[in-house]
Image: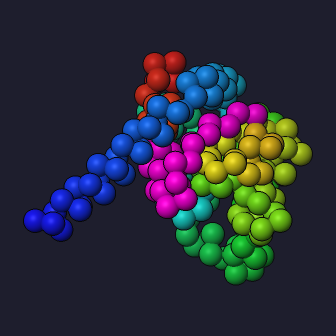
Amino acid sequence: MKFFSNNTKYITHYLEGLISTVKDLSLKEINETIQLLVKLKRRRGRLFILGIGGSAANSSHAVNDFRKICKIEAYTPSDNISELTARTNDDGWESVFINWLKVSNLTKKDTVMVFSVGGGDSKKNISVNLIYALRYAKKVGANIIGIVSKDGGFTKKVANITIMISVKSIKTTTAYAESLQAIILHTIVNHPSLT
């Protein structure tokens, strides 16, 4: 019975932290993201979604929802593992996203969305591939949306809009960030102005 009560205590603590993190989300940032995506849809721009690890899985999920529910042309490099691994092998992991955006002919009419726990940090050599891609997006004039945690990293510095997922503890940062990416995604794609 002690094992069960310890598990219940952990589960309760975890879920209470998640609920608290949901309550910390900025409705203003989510609403601004929706408005930016409404404009993207009206001008028939494309949405390019970048993520690594669990955020890559959320990126793939997001492509499905933006295409199917919102009728927005959307893509992510993680949906084509052959191209992603070939580019990684031939060009290096750091440049895999920027080269993919270049071949996709990213323009100022388009938007880049980033799902990331930390948003990229060049000094710590973390998610440098996101940093290169976002520098390119800025150069082209594409809008950037970030859905990130921790301090937002490079993504927060360059994004037009950043939805921040607050940190409750170091142990739960990644789990909460990746879980809430999906919740934020569903909040956006099911909004009446996009469906």
Q: Is residue 74 left or right of residue 122?
A: left
- Nearer to us in this view, 74 or 149: 149
Q: Quadrant of residue 35?
A: top right
Q: Identify the residue shown where x is 74% and y is 52%.
A: 153
Q: Position of residue 119 (x, y in %)?
A: 69, 53
Residue at 76% over, 40% down: 159
> Which residue occupies the foreground of this view, 59 or 28?
28
- Asked if residue 148 shows in the view, the reply is yes
- Residue 37 falls left or right of residue 191: right
Rendered location of residue 136, percent (x, y): 84, 51
Q: For the point 56% across and 48% down, which residue is it? A: 167
Q: Is residue 84 above or below residue 66?
A: below
- Residue 67 vertical placement versus 134 (above, below): above
Which segment did they paint magenta?
Answer: 160-183
In the current view of this chain or complex, which residue is farthest to the top? 193
Query: Eyeballing the image, is 85 above or below 131?
Result: below
Q: Quadrant of residue 3?
A: bottom left
Residue 149 x, y percent position in the rendering: 61, 48
Q: Determine if the magenta segment contains residue 116.
A: no
Left or right side of 132 for 74:
left
